Image: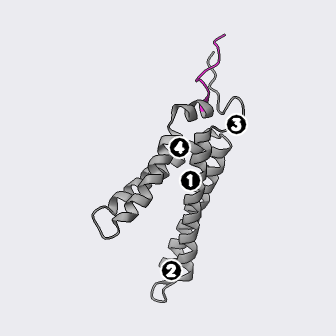
Amino acid sequence: MRVATLNNVDGRATPLMRAAAAVVALETLVLLAVAVLGLVSLSTDRPALGVTNSVFFLLCATGLGLCAHGLAHYRAWSRGPIVIAQVIQLGIAWSFVGQKTAWLSVVLAVPAVAVLGAVLAPSTTTALYGRGSVDDG
């Protein structure tokens, strides 16, 4: 019988996992700042849009923060949402290429690529999921 392991055998996150979790936590703080700035600069013309955007960024920050915490504590469930968030971030970065704000594409793409490399690294996969199975029988 094959039994997949769900987390690190020795109970510790790898250095790559800790680094990725730190970058994701920083991204969480940026999303929180965007949410707060959205509320602070509400437009009297369209207040509902500002509140809705702030709530959206707050929810994204909360989810990403939970995933950063999960990754730092070697929780396998955290990897999927982090990968999705980084791929979305790469898409957003791509949208800034060729404009006056092209520098923003680099600011968004570099941490996204670094986090993707860290969470998809073989050492992270082994730490999160083990070697794949326990001996048969």
In 3D space, how far apart are the residues under numbered discs 3 and 4 (Cα atoms)? 19 Å
Q: Dot 3: within a 10 Å radius of its alpha carbon, few (fewer than 14), some, or many (20 or more) residues?
A: some
Question: Is residue 47 left or right of 65 when viewed as pictured?
Answer: left
What is the C-alpha distance between the residues marked 3 and 2?
44 Å
Instruction: Say what secondary structure mark 1 lies in.
Output: helix
> Tag count in the figure?
4
First of labels 4, 2 by sequence position: 2
C-alpha gap between disc 2 and disc 1: 31 Å
Q: Mark 3 against mark 4, which lies toward the viewer?
A: 3
The x and y percentages for residue 89 are 44, 56
Q: Are marks 3 and 4 in contact (CB under 8 Å)?
A: no
The earlier-in-sequence mark between 3 and 2 is 3
Residue 12 circle label = 3
Mark 4 in CB contact with mark 2 (< 8 angstroms): no
Q: Are marks 2 and 1 in contact (CB under 8 Å)?
A: no
Q: Is residue 123 magenta?
A: no
Determine whether 129 is above or below 69 in the image: above
Disc 2 crowd, CA 10 A, few/some/many (<14, 14-19, 20+): few
The residue carrying pointer 1 sits among few (fewer than 14), some (14 to 19) or many (20 or more) residues within 10 Å by Cα, namely: some
Q: CA distance from mark 4 to mark 1?
A: 16 Å
Would you say residue 60 is visible in this rendering?
yes
SS category of the residue bearing label 4: helix
Instruction: Indicate which label's residue lies in the foreground, 3 or 2.
Output: 3
**Which label belongs to residue 80?**
4
Q: Which residue is mark 1?
A: 23
Looking at the image, residue 57 lies above or below residue 45: above
Amino acid carrying mark 2 in the image:
Ala
> Is disc 3 placed on a helix, strand or loop?
loop
Furthest-bottom residue in view? Answer: 44
Please name the amino acid that badge 3 sits on: Arg
Q: Which mark is residue 48?
A: 2
Q: Earlier in the sequence, mark 2 or mark 1?
A: 1
